[in-house]
Image (cartoon, grey):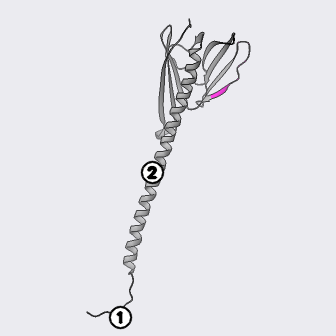
Amino acid sequence: MMLNRGRLMGFTLLELAAALSLIGVVGLSFAHLYLTSQQQLTQAVLIESTQAEAAIALEHIKRQLLQAVAVIVPAEGENPPPSTMNFQIRRRVGGSLMNAQYRRLLDGSLQYSEVPQDQSAQWTNIGRNIAAITFTRNSQSRLTVNIRATAGSGGGARTTKEQAVIGLVGVP
């Protein structure tokens, strides 16, 4: 067996091109995997935050309704225009009658105000991305509240629904 002493040991241009192509394909695969997982994570966070917003808003409404002495809600099943969604809860706080009021704005914000009857409302944001709130009176003493929250837009929009059936004690 004879060795060719004139030929240098190393890689040919073809071998280098094949190796670089393989490294490039593997690198692009990892980049695609990373970007896909980032998109999935963003969607999961969006869904989670939307569910949390709806749950917090529903819990806030539920707590107020459980203390109510009078409830004025939109007609059964009605979802008023976004800019005018109001309902009132009258409850006693330390002997005085308070008006608790909610409104949903065009941008999906849910706002809350609680003031004595003779004062004007000062609004506090308690939720975002609220698409709809509906009320159904099951009986004189039971009310079902549904909240639908939507985050994102177009094909990436995510919707969640929260529901509570609330027993109204002492409400006429």
Q: Does the magenta-highlighted stretch encompass residue 124? A: yes
Q: Position of residue 3 (x, y in %)?
A: 31, 92
Crowdedness near tag 1: few (<14), some (14–19) or many (≥20) residues, C-alpha within 10 Å? few
Q: Secondary structure at mark 2?
A: helix
Magenta segment, prevailing SS (helix, strand or loop): loop
Residue at (49, 49) in percent of width and height = 38
Residue at the location (49% across, 37% down)? 47
Residue at horizontal 51%, vertical 41%? 45
- The residue that disc 2 covers is 36
**Quick one: label 2 or label 1, which is nearer the N terminus?**
1
Q: Residue 30 in the image: x percent, y percent?
A: 43, 59
- Is 8 left or right of 83, judged from the image as shown? left
Place of residue 116 in the rendered image (x, y in percent of width and height, measured from the top left): 71, 14
In the image, is residue 24 part of the stretch drawn in magenta? no
Tag 2: amino acid: Thr
Say which element carries label 1: loop
Q: Which residues are magenta?
A: 116-125
The extreme right residue here reads: 119
- The residue carrying mark 1 is 5
Note whether 73 is above or below 105 in the view shown: above
In the rendered structure, find residue 18 and report the number of the disc placed on it: none
Q: Is residue 9 left or right of residue 138?
A: left
Q: Is residue 73 above or below residue 103?
A: above
Amino acid type at circle 1 is: Arg
What's the CA distance linking mark 2 and mark 1?
Answer: 52 Å
How many labels, in total? 2
Is residue 153 something one can see in this rendering?
Answer: no
**Nearest to the observer: residue 110 or residue 171:** 171
Please provide percent x and percent y for residue 44: 48, 41
Q: Quadrant of the C terminus?
A: top right
